């Protein structure tokens, strides 16, 4: 049995073991996937021990994505630009591969929902690690514009300077969104985790806008409730992104791509219980 874990702190609530166990059954892979809680100061030691004991790969979550970036001996382009790693693969004598599948997870989930990025006017709310991880994969689908708006606009501007060579991307304050309308609004802020919403002008949301909140929960997230009240045509939460990033990590490790639809239905059921 090949061993995989998700490493984080805290980690007991993670849905990843359930998702990857379902993928392993579906694809007939002989593997285990468990949670590994590492002390906040001891990520490198925990990973070194796990790989020394035969671990083949891991997912990495809060607060260790930057430590994992530092530990990888080889990085994919998308991980390098994300500045963070959520997937490590043990390449034995060839070292440790670091990848970031979060952005591809978002893009795949948008495609699964038949949301077209090409030529779309896209607004990305937030400018933290979650935003940074999705910018390159979004730009690869050639939206007409990608506007990054953040409460603290200086962080949005820093992201724009990092990614300006990758596509048409610009920064905005929340207030300056008064005169713009967007086809797709992607909310990478943590607002919904606190029952809040990003306080953008309601006029940025039209009755053609699709709003995607990276947060998920048993009901409609607080940001998505607000977006619906402003007239959004459709809201989507981040559960599908979680499952699609997992499918992408699984593919990196096992070179076989699991199908996500059935797993999404099981997870919906699981989080509503
Ligand atoms: P993550 O790694 O999940 O992106 P983070 O780096 O702490 O987490 O970033 C959180 C993001 O959510 C930031 O963009 C933050 O805005 P500020 O940079 O202005 O702090 C945003 N955020 C959190 N709560 C918010 C709220 N209630 N309204 C708007 N933005 C919010």
Image (tube, rainbow, N blue to C red):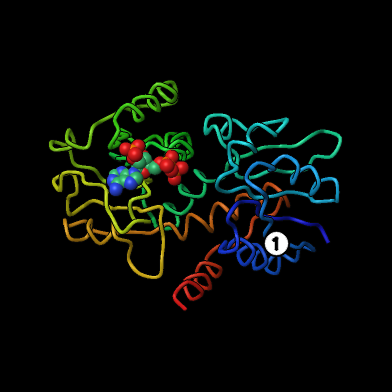
- At x 81%, y 57%, the residue is 2
- Depth order, front residue of 41/6: 41
List x then y, in percent, for residue 193: 38, 56
* Residue at horizontal 69 percent and vertical 56 percent from the top: 36
Helix, strand, or loop for circle 1?
A: strand
User: Is residue 157 placed above or below 219 in the rendered structure?
Assistant: above
Q: Is residue 118 visible?
A: no
Please name the residue shown 13% across and 45% down the image.
Answer: 203
Residue 36 seen in the current view? yes
For disc 1, does the CB lie below 8 Å from ligand 1? no
Dot 1 surroundings within 10 Å: few (below 14), some, or many (20 or more)?
some
Report the side of 52 relative to 237 (left or right).
Answer: right
- For the residue pair 31 and 8, the one nearer the viewer reads as 8
* Residue that extends furthest to the bottom in the rendered view of this protein: 273
Give residue 171's position: percent from left, percent from top: 29, 28
**Number of marks in picture:** 1
Image quadrant holding the N terminus, namely: bottom right
- Residue at image position (56%, 68%) is 263
Give the x, y percent position of residue 260. 55, 62
Q: Please name the residue that numbered disc 1 is placed on.
A: 34
Q: Position of residue 53 (x, y in %)?
A: 86, 51
């Amino acid at each position: 049995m090949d061993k995989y874990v998700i490493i984080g702190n805290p980690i007991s609530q993670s849905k990843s073991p359930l998702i990857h166990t379902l993928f392993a059954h579906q694809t007939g892979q002989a593997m285990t996937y468990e949670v590994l809680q590492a002390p906040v100061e001891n990520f490198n030691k925990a990973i070194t021990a796990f790989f020394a004991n035969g671990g083949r790969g891991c997912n990495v979550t809060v607060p260790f994505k930057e430590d994992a970036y530092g530990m990888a001996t080889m990085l994919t382009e998308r991980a390098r630009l994300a500045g963070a790693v959520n997937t490590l693969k043990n390449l034995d004598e060839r070292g440790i591969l670091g990848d970031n599948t979060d952005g591809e997870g978002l893009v795949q989930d948008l495609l699964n929902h038949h949301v077209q990025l090409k030529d779309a006017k896209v607004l990305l709310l937030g400018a933290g690690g979650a935003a940074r991880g999705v910018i390159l994969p979004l730009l690869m689908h050639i939206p007409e514009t990608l506007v990054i708006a953040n409460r603290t606009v200086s962080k949005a501007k820093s992201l724009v300077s990092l990614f300006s060579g990758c596509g048409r991307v610009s920064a905005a304050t929340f207030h300056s969104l008064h005169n713009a309308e967007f086809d797709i609004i992607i909310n990478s802020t943590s607002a919904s985790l606190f029952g809040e919403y990003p306080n953008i002008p309601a006029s940025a949301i039209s009755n053609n806008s699709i709003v995607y909140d990276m947060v998920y929960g048993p009901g409609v997230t607080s940001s998505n409730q607000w977006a619906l009240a402003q007239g959004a045509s459709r809201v989507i939460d981040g559960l599908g992104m979680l499952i699609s990033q997992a499918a992408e990590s699984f593919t990196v490790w096992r070179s076989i791509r699991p199908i996500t639809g059935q797993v999404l239905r099981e997870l919906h059921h699981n989080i509503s219980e």
